[in-house]
Image (cartoon, rainbow, N blue to C red):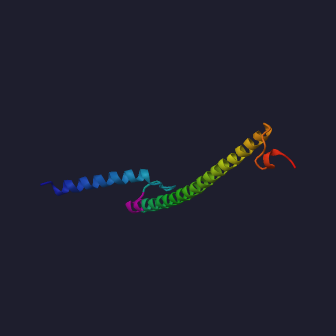
């Protein structure tokens, strides 16, 4: 079995290593000198809460932008359909004009193209 004193020293060394890593991850501010374990853990907790809040805001903004994108996409599709309709009206007017340009009687004129 392992010596309890060795295990205890190993755990303390591991804890010191983790605390040093945590110091590198947590913004410590102006008083970046010597921190107690409690103050470091408190700052880490506050930093995590701040990051979670930023993440929530970012997700909310993403959802809002996705809704806006869907709305704009629907408007674009609507405009596209409207343009197709306008183009088809324009092309049918254009073909009616070209019929009359060729001397053919217009569809809405008098019967047989003769006047009374």
Residue located at (68% from left, 46% from top):
88
Task: State the quadrant of the N terminus.
Answer: bottom left
Is 40 covered by the magenta stretch? yes
Residue located at (69% from left, 46% from top):
87
Range of magenta residues: 35-41
Residue located at (39% from left, 53% from top):
22
Q: Position of residue 39 (x, y in %)?
A: 42, 62
Image-based side of 84 in relation to 94, left or right: left
Q: Position of residue 28 (x, y in %)?
A: 47, 55
Q: Position of residue 93 (x, y in %)?
A: 74, 45
* Predominant SS of the magenta segment: helix
> Which of 9 and 115 lies nearest the eye of the viewer?
115
Image-based side of 44 in relation to 94, left or right: left
Residue located at (46% from left, 62% from top):
49
Q: Position of residue 7 (x, y in %)?
A: 20, 55
> Which of 25 and 71 lies nearest the eye of the viewer?
71
Q: Quadrant of residue 103?
A: top right
Image-based side of 68 in relation to 52, left or right: right
Counting labels gives 0
Image-based side of 2 in relation to 42, left or right: left
> Which of 6 and 81 lies nearest the eye of the viewer?
81
> Which of 103 and 87 lies nearest the eye of the viewer?
103
């Amino acid at each position: 079995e392992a010596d309890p004193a060795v295990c205890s020293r190993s755990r303390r060394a591991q804890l010191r290593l983790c605390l040093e890593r945590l110091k590198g991850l947590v913004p410590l501010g102006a008083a970046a000198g010597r921190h107690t374990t409690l103050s470091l853990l408190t700052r880490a907790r506050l930093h995590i809460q701040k990051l979670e809040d930023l993440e929530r805001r970012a997700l909310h903004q993403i959802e809002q932008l996705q809704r806006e994108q869907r709305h704009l996409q629907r408007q674009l599709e609507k405009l596209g359909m409207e343009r197709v309709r306008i183009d088809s009206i324009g092309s049918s007017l254009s073909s009616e004009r070209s019929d009359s340009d060729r001397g053919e009687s217009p569809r809405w004129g008098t019967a047989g193209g003769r006047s009374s």
